[in-house]
Image: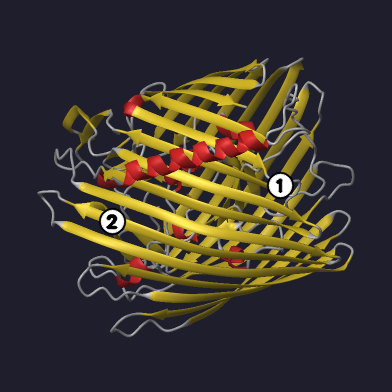
Amino acid sequence: MTCRRNIVIITAALFTTTLLAEELTDTVSHRLGEVLVTARRTERDIIPVQTLTGEELHRLNSNSVADALRFFSGVQVKDYGGVGGIKTVNIRSMGTNHTGVVYDGVELGNAQNGQIDLGQFSLDNIEGLSLYNGQKSEILQPAKDFGSAGTIYMRTRKPVFNDGESYHARATFRTGSFDLINPSALVELKLSERISASLSAELINSSGKYKFRYRRVNPAGELAYDTTAVRENGDINATRIELNTYGSLRSGSWTFKAYNYNSERGVPGAIVNNVWRHGERIWDTNSFIQGRYTGYFGKFTTLNSVKYAFYRTHYVNNDDKQVKIDNLYKQKEIYLSSANEYEIVNNWSVSASYDFLWNTLDADMYGFVKPDRISQFLSAATALNLDRFKVQASVLGTFIHDRIKGQQAPDDKHVFSPALYLSGYPFRNTDFSLRAFFKRSFRMPTFNDLYYADMGNSLLSPERVTQYNFGVLYDRNRPGRPVNAIRLSADVYYNKVKDKIVAYPKGQQFRWTMLNLGLVDIRGVDVTGLLTLNPLKDFYITGRVQYTWQRAIDITNPADNYYRDQIPYIPHHSGAAVVNVQWRGWNANYSWIYVGERYNQQENIRYNYTQPWYTSDISLSKDFRLGRVNLRGLIEINNLLSQDYDVILNYPMPKRNYRFTITVEL
């Protein structure tokens, strides 16, 4: 009933908004064609960043933000399979909880387990996706943003209107394998000369059923069993509705966002001992509202944010072979932030930010301690931009106070985390630059880590990370030339994680085993390359490649059997390649992803070995124009070679599958 009610709400909202758009629309004789503007940035990022924007995002055979992030170097995506499977991201082996996820300027939160399921965020309304190692290349940002070891920034599409336009509308319909039904719609309105709004809605429904091959070899190398079956309990029924409002002022701007996501999902558990189906199900309701104001007053700039979020999770396990569970979890979050920057002299600025965050968690379990946490963040930063060199420095103070019902809460935490960033051009009039950074970061264990009776560990120590990075970059754009753009980068990094917290499934996907590994030594190399060719008029060939080598080992105790072994699920080698060809509305795309051998437990022995996997995806699209109407047809074939592979052991991924998309835009 909940999903049906949401569908009715979405339909009514879109219908009402469309009627309003018709009333506001002036009659125009024609619509100006879309213009693609390519310009070289006057300011380059001092901090290593990987970015996908606009059409580039939609050519990657990716349905969610998590899928697109697989094409960034240094990223490990934990994917439990299927359309509705949980997808989390780990940057440079430091753990999901050290990865901040910022949606239109405000960080997403999950105090319960610290993990943001990026599979819940569609690319339909995402205009830009960026990944920063360290922190963003700006000192005007919320204090909390200085605290993550790496951050993902998602930016939604902002309405842009030509003269005479007062509305845009877009409708998309996807279907394909797994009985997929995925319609979405977007309406953009020009409410006045200073105010615009957009309403985006999406429905996704899928049985989640797909065939897979389950083949296992025992430690002696003998075939234990080899069979083909159908993945069950991977269905999803979800709706997303999102309202964005944008306003400009004489001395600034403001934005407002209201977001709601509802889903019912089956949780396909691990396949062990010929058990093919599990009785776990999750109902999620994620809602939040947020607003931002940016003011410019001479040399002083202020950025203020406010957010309220409510997350409701209903988890049921009716599996006959496990303990019956029916639990309801409710999270609330209030977030306030004020960031302020002042330009002392030309090219030298300072900033100060203060954030207040309140989180609470309630559950209907017997004896639940109902924790709440007050977090305060205070940052100071400075940026100096010289002729050929840039320097940024910051320090973040984190102050944590927990309260729990009927028990002694952990001691308050007060931690200061410094960071220093350098970049420069060693040679004049060149596109070659060097960059380096040092950063310390801190993260408190989540409510799940500390307080859950059957999986929490109240003795967990907070994690502390020290990062070092040195990189080189060659970046040259030559519009109108046969070689249109070249970008090459390489970064060498060293991360040291003290008291690293590791979570992995404990028989049930929704529940985890938590432990401190003590000390983890992480060393790696990220290499990326981009080449765009324009040999003929209207004909473009773009190639993108990334490669990562990592050694992430446990160096806690020489007496442990796994001392200096690679930590679970971190490959030594991984990479991706994308080739795109564009010609007069036709667009062909090929993408390839590779993840090397890994181990699924702490000991790097043959029994825990997980074999490498790779996939190939292709797509073909065509853009049409009929009067004022733009049309696009898209055909995708994913896992072209029908490879059998597991991202997480015993969670088989789909074999070859298909997706068909038609988009109509006014």
Q: Relative to residue 229, is residue 519 depicted above or below?
A: below
Within 10 Å of disc 1 (Cα), the crowding (few <14, some 14-19, many 20+) is: some
Residue at the image position 46 percent from the left and 25 percent from the top: 616
For numbered disc 1, what is the local secondary structure?
strand
Q: Amino acid at mark 2?
A: His
The nearer-to-camera label among 2 and 1 is: 2
Query: How far across and how far down the image is residue 168, in percent?
Result: 64, 33
| Residue placed most toward the observer, 658 or 386 | 658
Quadrant hosting residue 609: top left
Q: Is residue 609 left or right of residue 158?
A: left
Q: Relative to residue 616, is residue 286 depicted above or below?
A: below
Quadrant hosting residue 77: top left
Identify the disc placed on residue 321.
none
Query: How far across and how far down the image is residue 411, in percent?
Result: 42, 84
Q: Amino acid at mark 1?
A: Val
Residue at the image position 89 percent from the left and 43 percent from the top: 429
Residue at the image position 28 percent from the left and 56 percent from the top: 314
Which residue lies under the disc numbered 1? 472
Q: Is residue 619 visible?
A: yes
The reply to whether discs 2 and 1 touch (Cβ–Cβ < 8 Å) is: no
Quadrant hosting residue 56: top right
* For marks 2 and 1 on the same chain, the one whose residue lies earlier in the sequence: 2
Which residue lies under the disc numbered 2? 314
| Residue placed most toward the observer, 384 or 268 | 268
Position of the C terminus by quadrant: top right
The furthest residue to the left: 320
| Residue placed most toward the observer, 336 or 69 | 336
